Amino acid sequence: MVIADENNPSLIRPTNLQGGPEMGSKKFGVEIRNNRRALSVINQNLVGAPSYPCVVNKRACLETQVISDKNLPNPVHRPITRKFAAQLASIQTCPEETKKTNPSADNFSVWEDCPITDVEEHKPATEQPEPMFLEQTQTDAVFSEKDQMEEVEMEDIFEEPIMDIDSCDAKNPLAVVDYVQDLYAYYRRMENSSCVSPSYMEQQFDINEKMRAILIDWLIEVHHKFELREETLFLTVNLIDRFLSQQAMVRKKLQLVGLVAMLLACKFEEVSVPVVDDLVFISDKAYTRKEVLEMEKLMLNILQFNMSVPTPYVFMKRFLKAAQSDRKLEHLSFFLIELCLVEHEMLKFPPSFLAAAAIYTAQCTLYGFKQWSKTCEWYTSYSEDQLIECSRLIVSFHQKAATGKLTGVHRKYCTSKFGYAAKCEPAAHVLVETQT
């Protein structure tokens, strides 16, 4: 090692740190040894002194927080959804955040990116910093109300929102967004007028429920062959039930009633209406043109020309929009509700209820579990518990759709036009869960 001469800075002399040359009354090496002792004292002071306030052991802080929270009163419990609970459990706890740590948790994970705030950076190193758990204990009384408020806010955030299904059609004049709510409120009030008693067949002396089922199943095939609109089929079935509930009919005229009901529905819904001769031909000329026109006159008089009634189709379109359906769900929903048209016992359900149950069952069939969102419940006004009984019946119809003699609906929805909806496996889990 070399040093410079005091008298001549340009002259550099070698020296020994232990002995070294004398400088004045002191040896240079001795001065170095004194400096070394001073540094060792400083190091000892640094080792024994408390850590610098900016350097905080995060794991220790979190552990002391867990210990201190055991003695604190539990926060007010509020009901939360399972979805919110799962998302809330995934959020790691931070010492400075107001969320309390669950002391009963078995596995406690540390959030390594948790910020450490409120530390005085220029605090002297000899001063002992205040323990983190003491600081939090003093501020718990201040933050308790804030904790509860934030918990409520988190519940509101993770709660399933109700969507506005009409906002996307605000610029579509055909969607009549301005008064669509009033329109469906009117349908709800008027749907009871379109319903008939499920026991009306008891008034008939020559026909029964099985004959009605055969007629509806045949009309579904005729409707599909003529490529008519979907609403035409639902109105046809409605006209048949309303007419037979007020007029006794012999069985040899029952097919004529079905043909005339379809003719009236076509005149009300279709742009291109089948002519009478087509209906005579489709019945294998079992009836004449004159008989068709006479039955048309009788039916209109019995029904008092009331053709504008809300059918399940009206509610199907609205509820499918609330369910944010795709083509697959739409085809399956219509397949299930057309199965209901054939069954006489489904007349006990209002059209809106039947439509909601069909969509609910279709969702259970596609997704493999019960699916009914808050948006669907809001726009249908039916809860999942209300629909489960009707859904169980629909699933039973689906299971036997391909068997027996009445398979017109199943054959119709086994085509590519309807996405092979009839080939979906029935939602058997609905039956199992309902029975248990």
Image: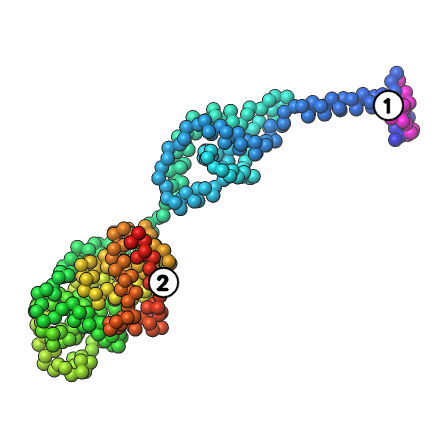
- Mark 2 Cα-neighbour bin, 10 Å: few <14, some 14–19, many ≥20: few
The residue lying at 16 percent from left, 81 percent from top is 280
How many numbered marks are there?
2
Q: In this orientation, which residue lies closer to the viewer: 258 or 28?
A: 258
Q: Is residue 249 left or right of residue 90?
A: left
Report helix, strand or loop for mark 2: loop
Amino acid type of the residue that numbered disc 1 sits on in the rendered structure: Gly
Q: Image height check: is 137 above or below 318?
A: above
Residue 42's tag is none
Q: Which residue is label 1 attached to?
A: 29
The residue lying at 25 percent from left, 71 percent from top is 404
Q: Image height check: is 138 above or below 351?
A: above
Q: Which residue is label 2 attached to?
A: 326
Q: Image height check: is 77 above or below 291?
A: above
Q: Position of residue 222 (x, y in %)?
A: 23, 76
Q: Position of residue 238 (x, y in %)?
A: 17, 66
State which region is magenta: 12-24
- Real-space Cα distance between discs 2 and 1? 90 Å
Whether residue 15 appears in magenta in the rendering, the answer is yes
- Mark 1 Cα-neighbour bin, 10 Å: few <14, some 14–19, many ≥20: some
The quadrant in which residue 79 appears is top left
> Mainly helix, strand or loop, the magenta region?
loop
Q: In this orientation, which residue lies closer to the viewer: 281 or 393?
A: 393
- In this orientation, does residue 265 appear? no
Which of the image's four quarters has the N terminus? top right
Q: Is residue 132 left or right of residue 278?
A: right
